[in-house]
Amino acid sequence: MKLWKALEKQDEEYFKEAASTGKLDDHLYMYYMPYSYTAEQIRKLRTFIFHMPDREVPRVIMITSALPAEGKSLVASNLAISIAKGEDQHVLLVECDIRKPSLHTLFKYPPSKGVVEIIQGKAEVADCLIKTPIDKLTILPAAKEAPPNPSELLESKNMKSLIKEVSERYSDRFIIIDTSPIQATVDPKILAGQVDAIIMVSRYRYTREADFKMALETLPKDKVIGIVLNAVDELPAKKYKYKKYNYSKYYS
């Protein structure tokens, strides 16, 4: 696969017409409200990732959850923005929830060819990258249309090759991978072996303990670096008059 020419940093030529076309979703707090309480919690998550004791900084990070609607894509997106705002970091946000992609609704681009078409040999990365208004943040979308064999595609050698090559091209590039929920599909378990670290997202008063524990047991324990407890309603968040849910706590 011809990947490298697509990944030259800040090379406008290769973005072509693939780019965000409208106002980004207002749940992207790191973009719209970078000094808010919620954005500060995302910064805490980023800081923990960069300063874990006795462990190298993970550069390929998978974000997943036990169930749908827990906010994993929002956490992945805000974390990606937070890292990209650093002085020396570039971020590729890869959507591997190829059954039900949602990043296009957050970053406002039309459903576009991406991971699936690259694995199938129908497209090159150069044709699939999505330029965002956030400097140093690029998106590799899931697919223009959901494939009939998602698990088989993610298990393929081409998928392993894709992750390996995009992560090894630059020493300052972070890969954030948004996957489907664990209890809904086998996909996160397939991808777990190809990443450096895993972050679980759990929604407050929504995720049942049994579902969370069952999901956690399917993942390699040495790669799970922490849990984001999402949608916690507490006084510091209320003080900022948020009308929507907040990313409030992170547990290592």
Image (cartoon, rainbow, N blue to C red):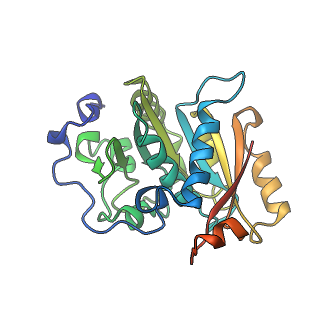
Q: Report the residue at 59% width, 48% height from top.
A: 63
> Does residue 145 lie above or below 197 as drawn?
below
| Apparent side of residue 57 relative to residue 99 in the rendered image (left or right) | right
Q: Report the residue at 49% width, 38% height from top.
A: 156
Q: Report the residue at 32% width, 63% height from top.
A: 111
Q: Nearer the viewer, residue 182 or 22?
A: 22
Q: Nearer the viewer, residue 218 or 249?
A: 249
Residue with the most extreme bottom position: 243
Q: Position of residue 193 (x, y in %)?
A: 62, 34
State the image quarter where residue 44 is shown.
top right
Q: Where does the C terminus fall, quadrant-wise?
A: top right
Q: Position of residue 14 (x, y in %)?
A: 18, 41
Residue 55 shows up from this direction: yes
Q: Position of residue 84 (x, y in %)?
A: 41, 42
State the image quarter where residue 207 is shown.
bottom right
Q: Position of residue 188 (x, y in %)?
A: 61, 48
| Apparent side of residue 212 relative to residue 65 in the rendered image (left or right) | right
